[in-house]
Image (tube, coloured by chain):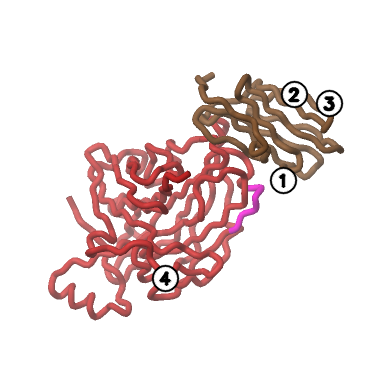
Amino acid sequence: LKSNGRIGPLGTGGLLLAGLLALGVPVAQAHFQLLYTPQAALQESAAIPLALVFSHPFDNGFTMDMGKPEAFYVVSQRGDAERRTTDLMPYLQPIQWSGGESKASAYLANPPRSVTRSLGDYTFVLRPAPYYEAQEDKYIQQITKTMVNIGGLPGGWDEPLGLPVEIVPLDKPYANWVGGVFRAVVMANGKPVPHAEIEVEYLNHEPEIAARRFNPEGKVRAPQDSFKTLSIRADAMGQVIIGLPKAGWWGICALNLDDDLKHQGKELSVDAVLWIQATDMTK
Amino acid sequence: MKHRTIAWIISPLALTAAVGAWAHNAICSCFDNGDETITCEGGFSDGGKAVGVPLHVFDQAGKVLVEGVMGKDSDFRFAKPKVPFRVEFDAGEGHKVVIDGRDIEK
């Protein structure tokens, strides 16, 4: 099994990082493409705001510049009615987003309510521009899905969208109690990926869309670096199961799913990201 | 049609533009198309279709203004009444959803 834990770019902690690297200590930080909206399960139709940010969500680490996405759209389905695809590229608004260590190019999108006024499942899909990771001298492209449901009427949440790489849910990504588990299958080119390398991170610093930043106050503290990015493997069937110990958004990223891809002469790692939301059981 | 077990209880809280909460219950949502027509969509929380489910539009006195059934796409479009109205999506006993016309947005 290969390992390609990512090394964060040199920032304010760069010297420390360099020192740790010199000592052979692995300091892996997970890059995560965010496709954030505050609420995954909506009672009623509403305009759904989205923030597209490329960052390190657990510790509000280095936030990276995003180029103009290659594709950004939503696939919606009400029950087993015909699936609809709506292009969201026209709604992209370039902004600067403040992470804990850096300010970076990111995007907001505020599609009108008419885009999301029907009942059903809405899978937002982002295919970002490849990001050049100088530390590894390669490009990363994280094809990202975030699923929202309106009104409790499901529609195709468990079906692949035919993306080159994707994480296909086995449980509704928008309906998860804290304490439960979430299951999914990692797929590349339409087939499950046995033993896929997976990183899981909790969105510890809540995005504040109006302020265009992450809340500097994290919700939890990791006792040690291994807890910031949870590294796991899919099983022999490409299935992933994660626990959900805390309310909020959890990102699942399957790394480097398509071998031998190049972008501008460099290695291109194509990853699949899926965001799911866990909800507290309360009255 | 799939089995549905849990009843929808009509209450003032149910008078919203999109309602639905428990497993296997009826769900209905309406929106204003902006061209003097209203579209109502229906279904069930298990993903079941609402094809053929009756839908009635009443005025405040309870008079039927529009009578129809959900079409092949589990929806129904009708001319927006000129008077205050409510929509009743009636999927059988315990599966009725009532929507106040004032809660229907574009």
Question: At which x and y percent is residue B2?
Answer: 51, 20
A113 falls in the magenta region: yes
- Residue B105, numbered circle: 1
In this view, the residue farthest toward the front is A283
Give above or below for A84 relative to A59. above
Label count reads 4
- Element marked by disc 3: loop
- Element marked by disc 4: loop
Do residues under tags 3 and 4 come within 8 Å of each other at their CB atoms?
Answer: no
> Which chain is represented by red in the image?
A
Tell me what residue is drawn at x 22 percent, y 67 percent.
A27
> Which chain is represented by brown in the image?
B
Direction from residue A17 to residue A127 in the image, left or right: right
Direction from residue A99 to residue B78 in the image, left or right: right
Q: Which stretch did the figure color magenta?
A: A110-115
Badge 1 and badge 2 in a common chain = yes
Dot 2 crowding, Cα within 10 Å, few <14, some 14–19, many 20+: some
Dot 1 crowding, Cα within 10 Å, few <14, some 14–19, many 20+: some
The disc, 3 or 1, on the residue closer to the chain's N-terminal end is 3
Question: At which x and y percent is residue A88?
Answer: 57, 53
Report the Cα–Cα distance between label 2 and label 3.
Answer: 14 Å
Name the residue tied to disc 3: B63
The disc, 2 or 3, on the residue closer to the chain's N-terminal end is 3
